[in-house]
Amino acid sequence: MLPEPAMLVVAVFSRYDEALAWSRHRLSTEFGPIALAGEPFAFTQTDYYQGTMGPNLQKQLLAFEELVPPDHLANIKLRTNDLEKEFAASAEFPEDRPLNLDPGILTLGKFMLATTKNQAHRIYLSQGIYAEVTLRFQAKSFAPWPWTYADYREPYVIGFLNEVREYYRRKIRPRG
């Protein structure tokens, strides 16, 4: 039996409001209407991206109405990588990477992110893309693992993903 479709959630971050707006528009064109959008927040948990993206990054989480088959995550990551390149090709911004798009999928029991970086706790999907179970649902809330990125440990992010989970629960079990 095939698994239930999942909620697509994309983390968008940039130092430019124009990039966030562009990505909301382009992502909704690609993946359908946005069901829930978190408030943008300061992405200060790491300076890993400063060299390619600059300082003062803002991050926003977007959840999409249309559910996706879980095995589409690798293709979605490849598409968001293409969208990043499309935005950078405009050459309107001085950074090499003025926009970062990190897709993931949410189910009742977990939130998974797609990545191009291999680590011991990641599973290879296809085409150079790995998946990581970033959060697990436990005791009525998402909870981090030892490897969970610092921003996904933030109460605001966990609260938003709990809200997305409830939306998803109602969507897949409308009478339950």
Image (spheres, rainbow, N blue to C red):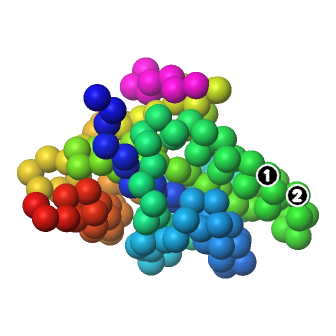
Residue 53, how many percent across, how many down? 71, 58
Residue 142, how many percent across, how many down? 23, 53
Say above or below: 64 vs 113: below
Mark 1–mark 2 Cα distance, whole angstroms, equals 6 Å
Figure quadrant of residue 9: bottom left
Q: Quadrant of the N terminus?
A: top left
Q: Residues within 10 Å of mark 2 (few under 14, many from 20)?
A: few
Residue 94 in view (yes/no): yes
Could you tell me which secondary element the residue under label 2 belongs to? helix
Write the residue at 88% across / 70% down.
92
Does residue 122 show up magenta in the picture? Answer: yes
Compared across the picture, whether 9 is left or right of 25 comes to left
Q: Quadrant of the C terminus?
A: bottom left
Q: Nearer the viewer, residue 133 or 3?
A: 3
> Are discs 1 and 2 less than 8 Å apart at CB?
yes
Q: Nearer the viewer, residue 88 or 34?
A: 34
Residue 171, how many percent across, how many down? 28, 63
**What residue is pinned by disc 1?**
85
Does residue 121 show up magenta in the picture? Answer: yes
**What residue is pinned by disc 2?**
89
